[in-house]
Amino acid sequence: MDIAVELRELARNLWWTWQPNVLALFRDLDPSAWREVNHNPVAFLSRFPPERLKERASELALEARVSYAVHRLHDYVQRAQSWGDVYTGPLRANPVAYFSAEFGLHESIPIYSGGLGILAGDHLKSASDLGIPLVGVGLFYAQGYFNQRLDAAGWQQESYFEAEIEDLPLERVVGTDGRPMRVEVQTQGGRIWIAVWRALVGRSTLVLLDSDVEGNADADRELTGRLYGGDAGVRIRQELILGVGGLRALSALGLRPGVLHLNEGHSAFVVLEMARQEMASDGVDFQEAMSRARARTVFTTHTPVAAGHDRFQKELIEFALKPLREELRLSLNELMAFGRVNPRDENETFCMTVLGIKAARKVNGVSSVHGEVTRRMWQVLWPGQSEVGVPIGHITNGVHVSSWLAPPMYDLYRSYLGPEWERRMCVPETWAAINAVEDGELWEAHQIIKARLVSYVQRQVCTQEAWRGGTGEACALTEKRLDPTILTIGFGRRFATYKRAALILSDEKRLERLLSDQQRPVQVIFAGKAHPSDDPGKQVVQRIFEMSRDPRFLGRLVFIEGYDINVARHLIQGVDVWLNTPRRPLEASGTSGMKALFNGVLNLSILDGWWAEAYDGSNGFAVGSGGQHVNERGQDARDAEALYSVLENEVVPLYYERDGRGVPRGWIARIKSAIRSLAWRFNANRMLMQYAGECYLPVVGVAPPAWDERTATRRD
């Protein structure tokens, strides 16, 4: 087969996003051009004339590698007897439809903003690996989330770009008539046409909806332009397109989902559309139709902060949903009741989370602590019920390991855990073999990854300074002072204020002692975006930027702009310590620390989210003891003191305690303890198997098979 054809086939299935050997094929063809297109193989190949591509592949003797990669893709897609084939067969005819407002699959496809989208992307990838029949449904944001730059004062500036569809691994869905498929939703203001795009994610499919369609009003064409952009009127119509339009698109594709899985409340209108379809097809009344829809719905909530739940005024609900409401034969007050805690309170707004909870058979939080917080938050929906008795459980998040693993760590796991370790990653015994890794070998692998990180950060700082027209001092001193031999702490996430990115900056004198210690220095790398309308979050970004320019910290405290999957990947793979300092109990789960874990990076975290159920005293470090002060300032002061104390008395001494060969044996022992005790639990395969057993199969009326969720084998 022609090598250009083979490479295009590889580029068109997002399987490549978790295949380092396939990514290396594209990178090797032209490393500079590969970086310029943000690691996007479709855009990359479009810049190569076919003859030049063949010539370059021949020069590098890539033909055999490319053919082998295509063979592996075919084998993967057609693989028989996957985990899902054995255990989730009833879902083949009627798959899971997984609705999410964002999907984080790769940095070159910017339809995500943060952890919610990254989780959704990992969910699709692990469903593919396991062979669980699942289709994702989301929105195609032509301008994506925003690009971040800091001006000379350190204030965040946002810019947007227009995606070139032909440069993305998407295909326009065509109907049986050979014309581009369109579905529609109706509002009081008229019809909105929706185009349907499809992406292949291994064996999974992602369906994306796009309102930039000829025939729509200009305002409607812009609805799917930006992720989380616009006012409440834009937001409710985006959510109408996602939920109602999403289910109609699946119907047009000939798919009838057996399970509706709502990843947060943005897509909750889908349940109303499912009820409408039941009424239209079987002639049942609304109560019966809603009962049927509810029986097929799973709702996952991620938001422990009251302000994070979408709420809409009555007038907006009527504008967006009147045509659907009339088909459901409901009055406006009857419809509003589904989104109100108190159905009789006509002054209460419509909450999408309330609709999701009321309309779901299964409801879950995303960690044990978050399950408790969610039951407490929504206990009011079950008057007279004790908090313990509220029917909301939890399924702790996990990460798609192959998407986040540095190649040296992958090679190490393959050598010591065996070639089938990825299929057996949910088995605790698989990870016991980490003890056999020689300490020096593990340390050397980490040092290689860390050196790459330091080089990357130095390049980024210099690029950022050039864009700002700086003096070059920050570039020069970062190149001089940022050092791969120094204990490196990483912090990267959304800069919501409750995440307290600046907690480590709260005592500048103590921080200065840590960073400037001659024998045991520390360096800190920050990255993250504040929402465009979040000025307090932007102020935190600005403070970190200003401190990074302070002569006391310059070159040892760094802020990397443009936080995305690529920046996150560099950080979680290469730092020594992953820092997480949310104000407990506001971290629903947090998955960045899980990604760091698989790369041999130790977590230093508040006992919140996943870390509250992961930390055992020997597999990382804890900030505080999990207490919650009644006063926020008191909590912040106490946590800051605990953070400095654990850094000064535990983290720094252990890192710099070396044997005669320069190997930190105690540090390596803690890394091995973390991998051995946590890797089998906090991966997305375990998460998907748990969803299948506790949610998907019961929803379609099938008793969960007798498998052992730890080993993915039958108990009999």
Image (spheres, helix red, strand yellow):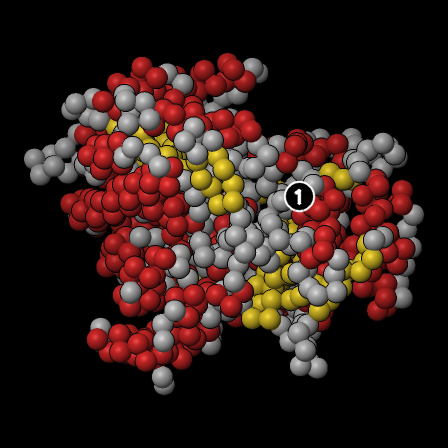
- Rendered residue at 72%/41% (across/down): 232
**Residue found at the very far left of the displayed protein:** 660
Q: Position of residue 29 (x, y in %)?
A: 29, 68
Q: Is residue 539 above or below residue 334?
A: above
- Rendered residue at 40%/45% (across/down): 568
Q: Nearer the viewer, residue 479 or 357?
A: 479
Q: Nearer the viewer, residue 168 or 626?
A: 168
Q: Position of residue 511 (x, y in %)?
A: 31, 20
The secondary structure type at the circle numbered 1 is: loop
In the picture of the structure, the residue carrying the numbered disc 1 is 230
Q: Is residue 497 visible?
A: no
Q: Position of residue 144 (x, y in %)?
A: 55, 52
Q: Position of residue 708 (x, y in %)?
A: 48, 56
Q: Is residue 339 left or right of residue 588?
A: right
Q: Nearer the viewer, residue 665 or 525?
A: 525
- Rendered residue at 90%/51% (across/down): 330
